[in-house]
Image (cartoon, helix red, strand yellow):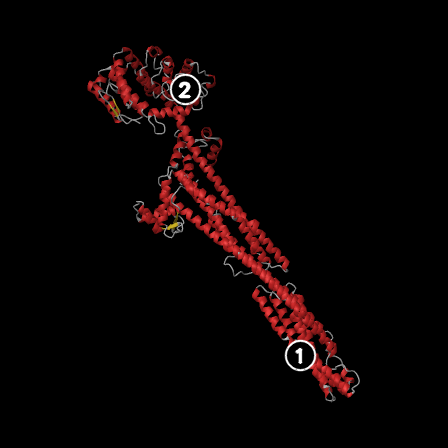
Amino acid sequence: MMNQIELSVPYDNGYEPDDYMMQDEEWDRDLLLDPAWEKQQRKTFTAWCNSHLRKAGTQIENIEEDFRNGLKLMLLLEVISGERLPKPDRGKMRFHKIANVNKALDFITSKGVKLVSIGAEEIVDGNVKMTLGMIWTIILRFAIQDISVEETSAKEGLLLWCQRKTAPYRNVNIQNFHVSWKDGLALCALIHRHRPDLIDYAKLNKDDPLGNLNLAFDIAEKHLDIPKMLDAEVLVSSDRPDERTVMTHDVYLQLLSHLCRVSKDILNTPKPDERAIMTYVSCFYHAFAGAEQAETAANRICKVLGVNQENEKLMEDYERLASELLEWIRRTIPWLENRVPEKTMSEMQRKLEDFRDYRRMHKPPKVQEKCQLEISFNTLQTKLRISNRPAFMPSEGKMVSDIASAWQGLDQAEKGYEEWLLTEIRRLERLDHLAEKFRQKATNHETWAAGKEEMLTRKDYESASLVEVRALLRKHEAFESDLSAHQDRVEQIAAIAQELNELDYHDVASVNQKCQSICDLWDQLGTLTQKRRESLERTEKLLETVEQLFLEYAKRSAPFNNWMEGAMEDLQDMFIVHTIEEVQTLIAAHEQFKATLPEADAERQAILGIQQEVLKISQNYGIRGDLTNPYSTITTEEIAIKWDKVKKLVPQRDSALQEELAQQHANERLRRQFAAQANLIGSWIQARMEEIGRCSMVTGGTLEDQMTQLKQYEHVIVSYKPNIDRLEGDHQLIQESLIFDNKHTNYTMEHIRVGWELLLTTIARTINEIETQILTRDAKGISQEQMNEFRSSFNHFDRKKNGAMDSDDFRACLISMGYDLGEVEFARIMMLVDPNASGVVSFQSFIDFMTRETADTDTAEQVIASFRILAADKPYILADELRQELPPDQAEYCISRMPPYSGPGALPGALDYTAFSTALYGESDL
């Protein structure tokens, strides 16, 4: 815009470009010699002045006479400027008149206009040319100079405004202020754009320019209350309309009627005078300035409300997703914390399979939801900061930290649940093993004890001979030896029962009952054994002869028989191992047992030799009668059968141990197979994490380059998922094989899962951070060089290289960038960048701070000013006004949220747009 206008002749044209100056000076000289020019100016300027003076209830008849005392001149300036001038002098003397005119000229000069050759004496003396020059100066300053669109000059701004308004209309292409207007369609388009009820543009004919111009000017005169300022005859008879005369109509649409009368001039002139056209067209700009201002205000409000509605939608989505995720966690944790054990291995295996399904199918989508929720929260906060809105505070219990805490509780419950499942499966495995062992030993003991009670209660010694009694006594001694040998077995059975009780075996009642029965029987046998010994010892005194050889047989055969039975039990004993070393220990023990077989065979031969000695003595000494050993129930045939069974069980035990050894080798291969893949995957995940970290710290290149690199990383990571699935398969095989440790790797499946989830979360968060930086950069108008400079400064002072600066490093960074920081100012800045007082500043917070101070964002004051325009300067607005100016959805949005206005002069239904606007930006509460 121009700040000053110089008049080198009685009045100037007001344009600064040099190429106008010489032409205007020559034209002015010609006009000064033309009496028609003076008549035309007098009539035009008189009409222009009266159009303003009518607002003050007066008018002028003769322009050079009525301004001579300066009173109406001062009144005219007050009307068109809206300002008060100094109080006029009311005297009628010449010096009073000169004083009033000087006050008017001083006011014009105060507006940046340099008056040349125009003095108060000439105006008071009625100099026509000086008076007309002064009026032209007023028109130029108050009607043309202030036209501006998007901070352009008056001419460029007006041209841009016309182009925008007529862009949708056919046959209109405004490129200048001369030939583009000759056919009259441009003027009709401007009228139709603002008042479509006054003209039917579709019926206009490009080939009828005179008709189009006359139509536009007639409509303006008839419907827009435009006074006539010019005679058509004057303009039509002129070869070229006087530019200043036409431009006099600048502020008012009234000059459109004059354009109608000079339409022949426009048509017949090869190139109409552009300053005249520009002046008349400016009338449209001023006539519709109010509508334009309201439209701008409405657009601003719509934009602000659109941002608010979008943000509220994002907030609602966050609240919904957070509620759903927290509800899922709330339902899942009790399931994971339910540690009620099942009674059988198959039922516990089903629980383990359900847990695997949870890990494979149910949890991964929730991991993605959690990550997306954090990303949405960060994006929303960034949009709120960029749009100068208050930060989003989710409902109580739905903060990102609350979700992270709940997720941590889920992970802890999940880890504990898996450990409990495996521990419980081990316990049940041990229980099944012990229960089977208990049944075998109990059955063997019951088989041995069958008939013993009946034997111990016999009275056979009462009718026996001395030899028979002694035989019975020796037989009883052999039984006592056998009974003592079974003491360890009974204790083993009781110990197994006790362990089953301690491990909470599901059928512990029957075990206890069986164990009690065996113990009761054992006590009864002990009592009966003692009683029978006492009876036999009393009878022994009556008996003298004993067959020592049978007794020796009995004494040696019983322990040997017991050894064979123990060996058979041991050879058939169930075993459970988990490592190669354990099974090798069993194999070594078995080899030691086999090494004792020759010694046992020698004992067997010796026992059989005793029996052979009995037969030999019987034959040698002619002993008759029953040669059955009266002292032992163990026959040589029984020893032979049991010995053969021991020899058969030895290779069977060998085979079972070798099969178990092979199984443990297979388990070891599974361990190594899992370890090899786990070590590769663990290292791969770590390498990708380091790559992502390095990429996020790069200062060269653009954010789009970083985004491209990160997207490539993301594609590589997603493509790597089958390797994780294969490792899950290997892990399942290991669990199904009941393998519980692996010395070949430090990575467990839990480590890999956590690392994989962390990798997915990190790449998603890093991409979101770059997207947020791009969003911030574009919204704040930050150049890539500035963003690189911010990143470089941040990286330099991020001394720990962990993506954050502590407060001292942040202070040093600000000082290096030219900030003069006192303690109070630094504390204020720290509150902005570290609202949670964590003591560190993230890169995003750093970027937000660096761009916040100079951000070109809308403010509450701007929105209040826009509402005030729609409300016609009232401190309140009505619902009908909102519905008239705004789209329906946004009008209802405002109506539903604006509080009632309670100030003075409020009408029923008045709404408080000030409170509503400040609440939008968090500066007040509704």
**Label 1 to label 2, Cα distance in Å?**
132 Å
Q: How crowded is mark 1: few (under 14 residues within 10 Å), some or many (20 or more)?
A: few
Quadrant, the N terminus: top left
Q: Is residue 849 visible?
A: yes
* Label 1 sits on residue: 602
In percent of width and height, residue 756 lies at 50, 51
Quadrant, the C terminus: top left
- Closer to the camera in the image, 683 or 925: 683
In percent of width and height, residue 508 lies at 65, 65
Badges 1 and 2: C-beta atoms under 8 Å apart? no
Relative horizontal placement of residue 618, taking residue 835 as reference (left or right) = right
- Closer to the camera in the image, 660 or 547: 660
For residue 449, which quarter of the picture?
bottom right
Numbered circles on residues, count: 2
User: Which residue type carries mark 1?
Assistant: Ala
Q: Can residue 406 be seen in this view?
A: no
Residue beneath the point at 46% across and 50% down:
688
User: Which residue type carries mark 2?
Assistant: Ala
Marks 1 and 2, the one that precedes in the sequence: 2
In percent of width and height, residue 799 lies at 36, 52
Relative horizontal placement of residue 144, taking residue 126 as reference (left or right) = right
Per the image, label 2 sits on a secondary structure element best described as helix
* Label 2 sits on residue: 186
In percent of width and height, residue 390 lies at 42, 42
For residue 588, which quarter of the picture?
bottom right
- Closer to the camera in the image, 549 or 760: 549
Per the image, label 1 sits on a secondary structure element best described as helix
